[in-house]
Amino acid sequence: MTPQEISDKLKAKFGDDILEVKIEGVIQPFVKISPGRIGDAAVFLRDDPDLQFDYLMCLSGVDYTKGILGVVYHIFSMPKRHTVILKAEVPADKPEIPSVTFVWPSANWHEREAYDLIGIVFKDHPDLRRILLPDDYPGHPLRKDFKVPEFYQGMKVPYD
Amino acid sequence: MIETQTAPIKTSTGRVLRPEEMVLNMGPQHPSTHGVLRLELVVDGEIVVDVIPHIGYLHRCFEKHAEHMTNYQQVIPYCDRMDYLASMNMDWAYALAVEKLLGLQVPDRVEYIRVIMAELQRIASHLIALGTYGLDVGAFTPFLFCFRDREGILDLFENTCGARLLYNYIWVGGLSHDLPSGFIDKARAFCRYFRPNIKELNDLLTYNEIFIKRTANVGVLPAEAAIAYGCSGPMLRGSGVDWDLRRDDPYSIYKKFQWQPQIGRGEMGTTGDCWDRYMVRVREMEQSLDIIEQALGGIPPGDVQSAVPRRIRPNAGDVYVRSESPRGEIGFYVISDGSATPYRVKARSPAFVNLSVCPEICKGYMIADVVAIVGSIDIVLGEVDR
């Protein structure tokens, strides 16, 4: 299916929760969805017989600054061979979004990584621990306002 | 009187151990984990009940570094160091993403050279995977044979760009150097030399009775699970899914070549077992040789640096581009805000995703089988941890 048909299908199902559909003027078309519905959208995308999105290629956390964090889902369908890109934005002071691990198990480690580096909290994630950084690391380094601490565990961090 | 322990013992995921279970740490310094991977094994006697991988020992903040470079080209040496066994493929994947962001078309000569380099790199990477896999399950000699053959490829690379492991060769829009004189003959000679050696490897290791006993019917990954867990590359094809990005989501000039993706067929046991994953890599080396030989015959003349932009300032936008590395789907999600540095670079590394299926396929096997299973995933920790 073309990006237009996929976004129409999503619009028909989720109505006003589809915040933005951008097909023209971008390199890769995307659909922006309100963060609360991402779990339902994931189930719909996987289970709808016309869509069959069974392969989560990539899940990225992004800091858009101005108090907005985002999660970008790149999803592919092996049987139908089409792609959809979902974007969701959450406020930085309450960065909560439902987990999609129960739909695509591959999201498990991607979500842990986004939690670790950006600080997005995935609700109902089976095992939301830090994955790349030590458990006691202060803060989320991929936030744009992150400052490297002067000392970590008593060791001086910046070296010139 | 000695006070007995009353608090329940938990794993790091919070699971309470039953009285007959114990936790065994494998790694981070363990020769069979191919780097610094720590596996927290919950075992009942010799049987593995659960596996909890701990990664991040080699985390070098690739994504943070990428945001702090002064331009897009400077990210490439960091890509080299992500998957240090397949640096060419990593550089290429990043270059593809930025070129798509720029809308840049690279000259034909560059495409041909990139394909040759990437396929040579694939063979080199698979040789390490196969050799060390033999080592994991107790065969030492194939390891030496594989490293001997890989040496020929590294010599070709060294001849071309001066480096043997971390090349910084594929740049956005072009290459750092043109091919040296005599490269095509040397590469042809290598293909002629190497093709019979695959048979040698098969005689020595692949069809070895002990090797088959160690790997067939071990770590079976069904096709549906492989797709659900986002596996890619030989891991996915080993499970019998006919899927190769070079053919199914073609990039560069792969459409011009005649070759066949290889899938696991369960010849020695069940489809998707360790032997299948191993065998897919062996057969892929032959296919890569085919591609290289075709590409060597068709390199057009031209310049490899004319399209390299001096200043890279893509328009604001984002792009996700994937390509087939020896380990699977390497994707780069690059966001540009219109400035000279990337706003955000996310690397979707194949081994990171492939490793996340490890707990699923290790359950119920013996501890010694965990070594065989982790080896068959072919992880490179530099890329898992980034």
Image (cartoon, rainbow, N blue to C red):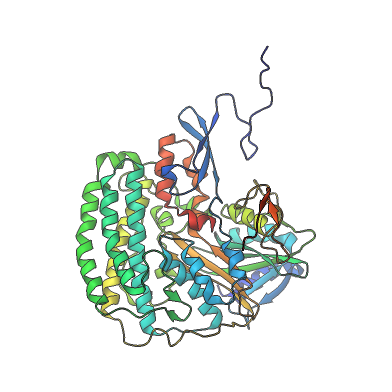
From the viewer's perspective, is residue B170 above or below residue B364? below
Q: Quick check: can you spot residue B167?
A: yes
Q: Name the residue located 29 percent from the left edge and 55 percent from the top edge.
A: B147
From the viewer's perspective, is residue B154 above or below residue B54? below
Task: Point out residue B126 in the picture as x, y percentages from the top left corner.
Answer: 35, 57
Question: Residue B1 is drawn in which quadrant?
Answer: top right
Task: Point out residue B120 in the picture as x, y percentages from the top left corner.
Answer: 33, 67
Question: How many numbered discs sit on the rendered protein?
Answer: 0
Residue B92 shown left or right of residue A73 in the figure: left
Q: Residue furthest front?
A: A160
Question: Residue B66 is drawn in which quadrant?
Answer: bottom right
Task: Point out residue A91 in the picture as x, y percentages from the top left corner.
Answer: 78, 63
Q: Name the residue located 36 percent from the left edge and 59 percent from the top edge.
A: B125
Q: Quadrant of the C terminus of chain B?
A: bottom right
Question: Residue A23 is drawn in which quadrant?
Answer: bottom right
Q: Name the residue located 27 percent from the left edge and 69 percent from the top edge.
A: B290
Towards the viewer: A33 or B156: B156
Towards the viewer: B110 or A20: B110
Q: Residue furthest right?
A: A93
Q: Residue furthest top?
A: B1
Residue B303 shown left or right of residue A1 in the figure: left
Residue B24 shown left or right of residue A148 in the figure: left
Task: Point out residue B269 in the picture as x, y percentages from the top left corner.
Answer: 33, 43
Q: Quick check: can you spot residue B219?
A: no
